[in-house]
Amino acid sequence: MEIGGIRRIPCEFPERKMWNLFLLLENDAMTKGYLRDKYAQVGLDHPDRAAFRASHAMMSYVRQARELYLAARQSSPFVSPLLTYYGTMSLAKVWMLSFDPDYPRNTFVLRHGASTRRRKRSDYRLAEDTIRIQPEGLLPELMRSSGWGALCNTSWSMKQLFSLLPDIQDSYRQVFRETSLYPIAIDSNPIEGAPSMSFTLEEKVLDQLHLTPRGFAERLTRTVVEPGPQFTVDKSPTPRGWIRFHWQHSESTHVDCWNRGFAHPWFREDVRGGYYLYPPNRGDSLGVMPEMFVHYLLLFSLSMLCRYEVPLWGEIVDGTAAKEAVLIEEFLQVTRRKFPNLILNTLFEEKILFVRE
């Protein structure tokens, strides 16, 4: 049975259309109705009262996010990380209010929830700079509420976080001379006579993991956070350098018909709906981090540089202090389009793809 589908919206200007959907949550009656349904869904007492209490805050955060993202888009990279980050925080608070009408319940949840070294060393390297997820604050609160609390109190480098974003992979490969995400070619139709579909993948991923095709399929099946898909090897002929696998799930016959896609933490998706595989090493928990948290952490780090290390940040964006300058500029463009889309998907519990006409 197919549940949680995909909504494809044809449009000439995807970013503008995306923000038009947020207008639904700037209307008082629609926001109260949305929150009432959400609070009833999670079993809160008196969902009508809770919706009345939280609706004004939600509308205000949506409006603030819209204004901050607009200002960021019109600004140069010298200041846009700061504007984008605070727009991101506003959208994160919208998400929080969708299940907690009393946010903020205390001053601890008003913190950013992440930290980085305030004073940078003289031999500073942006790719090696680390961000730590703190036990208290907006980010860890969202992580725990969505089942990812195990990521709290962990630290990640900027390079590791960049490696998880499919929309900037071309630049990532050019800057770091390595591949972190492998593109996937998906068969358009389910396999005839079977509730499954096939996909092909570059064979060199097996060399990176030191696995046979069968061993890789078995590891994919084992590496799920809940009862999920089954993976098996498809032995039909493939082009040289590629391998094919079957994907099967009890709730869907094809990843393009389901808002959860592959329903597997190693698979990531770009803004156009294309899929990539992140093959983490054994014991590596980075690969399971949902993309919206990756955006949050990167923007937090860049905004801290922008705000507190102004001379260094000027050298970075001018390309004189970091080879990642091009990667940063592309990320800032991508995140203004991608993060609000991810929040929309979460709020409305469906995958929304804005497709150019």
Image (cartoon, grey):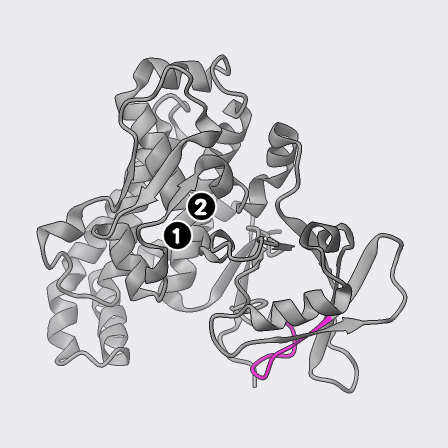
Closer to the camera, 233 or 123?
A: 123
**Residue 255 seen in the current view:** no
Q: Quadrant of the N terminus?
A: bottom right
Left or right placement of residue 196 versus residue 251 in this view: right
Label 1 and label 2: CA atoms lie apart by 6 Å
Query: Can you say whether 171 is above or below 100 in the image?
Result: above
Query: Can you say whether 76 is above or below 11 in the image?
Result: above
Closer to the camera, 267 or 59?
A: 267
Q: Which mark is residue 20?
A: 1
User: What stretch of residues is rendered in magenta?
Assistant: 246-256
Residue 192 belongs to the span the image colors magenta? no
| Residue located at (22% from left, 81% from top) | 43
Task: Identify residue for label 2.
Answer: 16
The reply to whether callout 1 and callout 2 are in contact (CB within 8 Å) is yes
| Amino acid type shown at disc 1 | Asn
**Residue 229 x, y percent position in the rendering:** 60, 76
